[in-house]
């Protein structure tokens, strides 16, 4: 990379799939921050290229709220480095991005936004859908949502098999108790979303991880959107509903799972207005 000399670096915590770092770099007497992602081991080159091309397409078509990808001197959007872990050499993939200004006001379970913020959060998703419309990412490694649901139905009952989890492990016991409900919900989805219903549904590049922790905030406004590594072509309705469930339902112990319909209204108004 031709970005200058690293002055300082630090890890950014909060993500659960990839590792994230910030780097302060100096070039020609000017200091600048960059965001560095260390991808999970099984991330494929093809999927990473789709993610980066999608970001650049969105920015080129008017989305100024996304962090641009910094390309190498050779024009590549990511690099591979060898690290030694437990005596074995492992190839890992890294990418460098512009650093988004703003605050990490909320996360994926702290979603108690004001009505104005609900609408603002919806508008940034509407922007993403608008400015990526027309981009064709092709097939990604991860399946589309309805295919994933069918896979989940088979996979959920087998989760934990072969793993050394004590039978008294509290999380594992809760998982086992909840599994029949998860399977039942998978059936509801596949039974309800028939081909007659889905035919003609608008499709567009979907973020697929749109929660309030994946945006930057400033003075009650969404000023940045990030984490596009799960983005793929899918039903637009799925992305909207994903955001509603994450941001407009309760994560508090006494009301856990309750969907706040007044907040859904603020959200949908914001989306439609944009």
Image: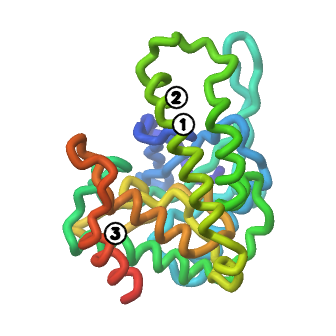
| Residue 218 position by quadrant | bottom left
Eye-nearest disc, 1 or 3: 1
Helix, strand or loop at disc 3?
Answer: strand
How many neighbours does mark 3 have within 10 angstroms: few (below 14), some (14-19), or many (20 or more)? many
**Camera-nearest residue between 16 and 241:** 241
Disc 2 secondary structure class: helix
Q: CA distance from mark 2 to mark 1?
A: 5 Å
**Looking at the picture, how far across and down is residue 145, in whole percent?**
65, 60
Residue at horizontal 45 percent and vertical 43 percent from the top: 22
Residue at screen point 47% across, 41% down:
15
Specify whether residue 104 is in view: no
**Residue nearer the viewer, 99 or 187:** 187
Q: Residues within 10 Å of mark 2 (few under 14, many from 20)?
A: some
Residue that carries the numbered disc 1 in the rendered image: 179
Q: Which sits earlier in the primary sequence, circle 3 or circle 2?
A: 2
In the rendered structure, the answer to whether residue 112 lies left or right of residue 179 reads: left
**Which one is in front, 51 or 199?**
199
Residue 112 percent location from the top left of the image: 23, 57
Question: Helix, strand or loop at disc 1?
Answer: helix
Q: Where residue 176 is drawn, which disc sits there?
A: 2
Distance CA(mark 1)–CA(mark 3): 36 Å
Q: Residue furthest bottom?
A: 273
**Residues at marks 3 and 2, CA–CA distance in whole angstroms:** 38 Å
Counting from the top left corner in percent of width and height, residue 116 is at 22, 74
Q: Is residue 16 left or right of residue 121?
A: right
Quadrant in which the C terminus is drawn? bottom left
Residue 165 at x, y = what percent? 56, 14
Q: Cβ–Cβ below 8 Å for labels 2 and 1?
A: yes
Say whether residue 47 is visible. Answer: yes
Res. 222 mark? 3
Specify the label residue 116 is tagged with. none
């Amino acid at each position: 990379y031709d970005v200058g000399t690293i002055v300082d670096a630090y890890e950014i915590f909060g993500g659960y799939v990839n590792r994230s770092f910030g780097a302060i770099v100096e070039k020609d007497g000017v200091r600048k921050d960059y965001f560095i992602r260390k991808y999970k081991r099984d991330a494929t080159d093809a999927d990473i290229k789709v993610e980066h091309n999608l970001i650049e397409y969105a920015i080129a078509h008017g989305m100024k709220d996304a962090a641009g990808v910094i390309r190498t001197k050779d024009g590549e959007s990511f690099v591979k480095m060898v690290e030694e872990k437990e005596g074995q050499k492992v190839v890992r993939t890294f990418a460098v991005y512009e650093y988004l200004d703003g605050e990490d006001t909320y996360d994926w379970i702290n979603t108690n936004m004001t009505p104005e913020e609900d609408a603002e959060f919806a508008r940034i998703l509407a922007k993403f859908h608008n400015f990526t419309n027309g981009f064709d990412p092709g097939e990604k490694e991860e399946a589309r949502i309805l295919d994933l649901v069918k896979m989940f139905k088979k996979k959920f009952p087998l989760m934990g098999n072969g793993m050394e989890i004590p039978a008294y492990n509290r999380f594992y016991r809760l998982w086992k108790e909840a599994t029949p409900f998860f399977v039942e919900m998978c059936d509801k989805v596949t039974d309800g979303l028939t081909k007659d219903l889905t035919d003609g549904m608008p499709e567009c590049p979907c973020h697929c991880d749109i929660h309030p922790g994946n945006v930057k905030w400033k003075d009650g406004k969404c000023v940045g959107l990030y984490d596009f590594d799960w983005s793929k072509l899918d039903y637009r309705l799925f992305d909207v509903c994903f955001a509603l469930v994450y941001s407009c339902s309760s994560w508090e112990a006494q009301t856990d799972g309750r969907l706040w319909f007044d907040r859904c209204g603020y959200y949908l108004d914001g989306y439609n207005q944009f």
